Image (cartoon, rainbow, N blue to C red):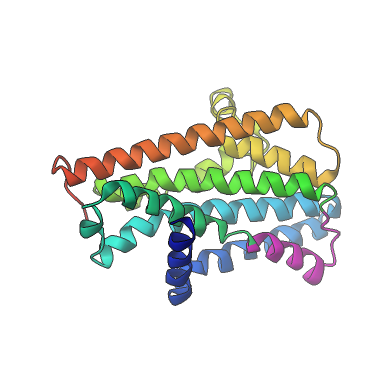
Amino acid sequence: MILTCARTQGVIMARSPGLLATLAVIPLYSLVFFHFLQRHHREDLATSVALTAFTMSLWAHAVFVAAEVVDDDRADATLEPSLLTPGRYLASLIIRIFTTTALALPALFEVVLIGRGVFGLDVTLRGPATALLVVLLLIAGCASAALMVSGLMIKVRGARTLQNSLTYPFYLLGGLILPVTQLPEAFRQLAKVFFLSWGTDLLRDAAAGPVPHLGQRLGVLCALVLLQTLTGVLLLRGVLTSVRSGKAVLHG
C-alpha cells in the first residue's frame, strides 16, 4: 500500500508540475542571501545561508503543497467517495503527504549549486551523514505540520487565509531569520518546543563538523517530530470522522 500511494502521488505531481513551483522559486532567495554575503565579506556563512534557504523551501513546500493533497482530492471530486473508507483514506493521505514533502529534498542540492556555481562560495557539509539524518527528520516534521494544515483545509472556512500566514512567523520560531536567542523571552520558550528550531541548529552544526551533545539533541528532535506527527494524525482522523458522520460540513 505504501508504494502504491507514494507512486500515485508521484504521478499526480508529474502531471501537475505547477505544484513544484515553490521548489523552483523559494531556493532562488539564496541568490539575494549569497549576494549580501559577498558584499559584506562574510563568505564564511555560505553553508549556513544555503541550509537556511533549503529549510525555508522545505517548510513552504509542506504547508503550501503537501497540505493541499486533501484539497486537490476535493477539487477532483474524489474526497467524498474516499470518506466511505476513512481508515484506508487516512493512511493514504499520510503516505501521500509525506511523499510530497520529501520531494523538497532536491532544493538542498539546488541551493548548494547556486552557492558554488553562481557565487563560487565554499558550501560544504563537513558532517554529511549527520546532516542527512537531520534533513530526513526535518522532512518528517514538516510533513507532520502539513497533516495538521490538511485537517484545517477540510473543516475550517477561510483556512487558506490561515495557511498564507504559516511562513515568516514559523521562520522566526525556527531560527531561520534571527537566532532564537535574539527573540523575546516568550518566543524563545515557544521555540524550545518547536522541532524546526532544534533541527535548524543541528543541521548547521552538522555542516560545520562534529556536533556537541549529538545524541541528546537528536533524541529531543525525534521526540518533537514524533509528538507532532501523532498530533497531526489524530487531528486529521478526527476531522475525517466528523465529516463522514455529518457532524462537520466540508468547506470550499
177 within the magenta span: no
The answer to which image quadrant residue 81 occupies is bottom left
Residue 164 visible in the displayed image: no
Judged by its main secondary structure, the magenta piece is helix
Residue at x 56% of width, y 64% of height: 23
Q: Is residue 92 above or below residue 87?
A: below
Residue at x 61% of width, y 34% of height: 222
Q: Position of residue 26 (x, y in %)?
A: 58, 62
Q: Is residue 35 left or right of residue 57?
A: right
Q: Is residue 174 left or right of residue 252?
A: right
Q: Position of residue 127 (x, y in %)?
A: 82, 46
The answer to which image quadrant residue 133 occupies is top right
- From which residue to which does the magenta span run? 106-124
Residue placed most toward the observer, 121 or 20: 20
Residue 198 visible in the displayed image: yes
Q: Is residue 66 above or below residue 110?
A: above
112 within the magenta span: yes
Residue placed most toward the observer, 90 or 65: 90
Can you say which quadrant of the picture contains the N terminus?
bottom left
Residue at x 61% of width, y 31% of height: 183
Residue sticking out furthest to the bottom: 15
Residue sticking out furthest to the left: 246
Can you say which quadrant of the picture contains the C terminus?
bottom left
The answer to which image quadrant residue 50 occupies is bottom right
Q: Position of residue 149 (x, y in %)?
A: 39, 46
Q: Position of residue 164 (x, y in %)?
A: 41, 52
Residue placed most toward the observer, 241 or 119: 241
Residue placed most toward the observer, 196 or 165: 196
Residue at x 68% of width, y 61% of height: 30
Q: Is residue 32 left or right of residue 245?
A: right
Q: How many marks?
A: 0
